[in-house]
Image (cartoon, helix red, strand yellow):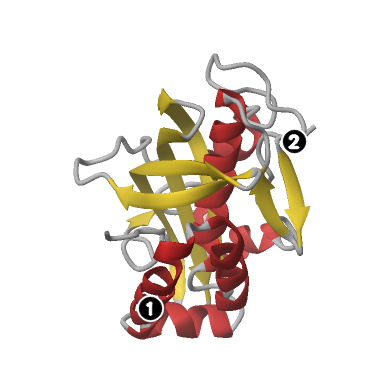
């Protein structure tokens, strides 16, 4: 099974980003309170050692779990390997943890530019712009997510990536666990690029996001 997060292929990005697109994702979608027609998921997430854990055994809870797991793993894989390891230890199925960590390490080794950018103060954010619950039972759930990744810093101009990601979850011991998370091979839709050049699309503009973090999804 091949696990994919937003790393060299996603959050180490390829297209120039517009700040207006970031504002749309951060401010235009109330994902904390919506669940794609499956009901609200207030309190669906608890923090365990700083790791978001999906603990609501409902369709809305599965969506909230997938949202948080995908966003957190995507932006931590290269940017904060320790946080990524903690997430894997808590919310990935035990049979998949060793392989997931090994693949993550290989991705870091294959992306020296991205790793250097992070080590010298670069930043990355991953956000779930939209998602769909494709199937749900008491034991498992599958979710398709529209994932956005943004990276900027001293070694990389601001960049963006958009992907569709298919995630399978299993319910076990009072929480949702990641069984697999794979980038869909079909091209994902990409918003129109605005302000390709100019003051809204430089590292200086992105420095205004200092201190900001991606939100948790599905919590009150």
Quarter of the view holding residue 216: top right
Which residue is rendered at x = 42% and y = 74% of the image? 98
Which residue is rendered at x = 35% and y = 74% of the image? 103
For the residues bearing labels 1 and 2, Cβ distance under 8 angstroms? no
**Residue underneath mark 1:** 102
**Res 209 label:** none
Q: Position of residue 171 (x, y in %)?
A: 54, 41
Is residue 6 something one can see in this rendering? Answer: yes
Q: Position of residue 28 (x, y in %)?
A: 61, 28
Q: Could you say which is closer to the camera, residue 66 or residue 24?
A: 66
127 to 92, vertically: above or below? above
Q: Quadrant of the C terminus?
A: top right
Q: How many marks?
A: 2
Label 2 sits on a secondary structure element that is loop
Which residue is rendered at x = 35% and y = 68% of the image? 8
Quarter of the view holding residue 194: top left
Which residue is rendered at x = 35% and y = 59% of the image? 4
Q: CA distance from mark 1 to mark 2?
A: 31 Å
Q: Position of residue 148 (x, y in %)?
A: 45, 46
Q: Could you say which is closer to the camera, residue 37 or residue 174?
A: 174
Is 119 left, or right, of 157 in this rendering?
A: right
**Residue underneath mark 2:** 219
User: Which residue is outermost to the right?
Assistant: 220
């Amino acid at each position: 099974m091949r696990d994919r997060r937003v790393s060299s292929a996603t959050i180490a990005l390829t297209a120039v980003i517009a700040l207006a697109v970031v504002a749309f994702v951060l401010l235009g979608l109330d994902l904390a309170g919506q669940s794609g027609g499956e009901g609200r998921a207030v309190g669906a997430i608890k923090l365990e050692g700083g790791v978001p854990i999906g603990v609501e055994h409902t369709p809305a809870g599965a969506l909230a779990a997938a949202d948080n797991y995908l966003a957190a793993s995507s932006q931590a894989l290269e940017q904060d390997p320790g946080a990524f390891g903690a997430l894997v230890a808590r919310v990935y199925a035990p049979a998949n943890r060793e392989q997931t960590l090994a693949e993550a390490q290989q991705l870091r080794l294959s992306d020296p530019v991205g790793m250097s950018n992070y080590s010298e103060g670069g930043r990355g954010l991953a956000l779930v712009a939209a998602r769909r619950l494709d199937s749900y039972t008491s034991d498992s759930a599958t979710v398709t997510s529209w994932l956005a990744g943004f990276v900027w810093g001293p070694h990389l101009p601001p960049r963006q990536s958009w992907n569709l990601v298919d995630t399978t979850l299993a319910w076990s011991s009072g929480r949702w666990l990641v069984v697999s998370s794979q980038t869909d091979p079909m091209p994902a839709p990409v918003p129109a690029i605005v302000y390709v050049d100019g003051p809204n699309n430089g590292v200086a503009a992105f420095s205004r996001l200092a201190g900001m973090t991606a939100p948790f999804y599905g919590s009150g």
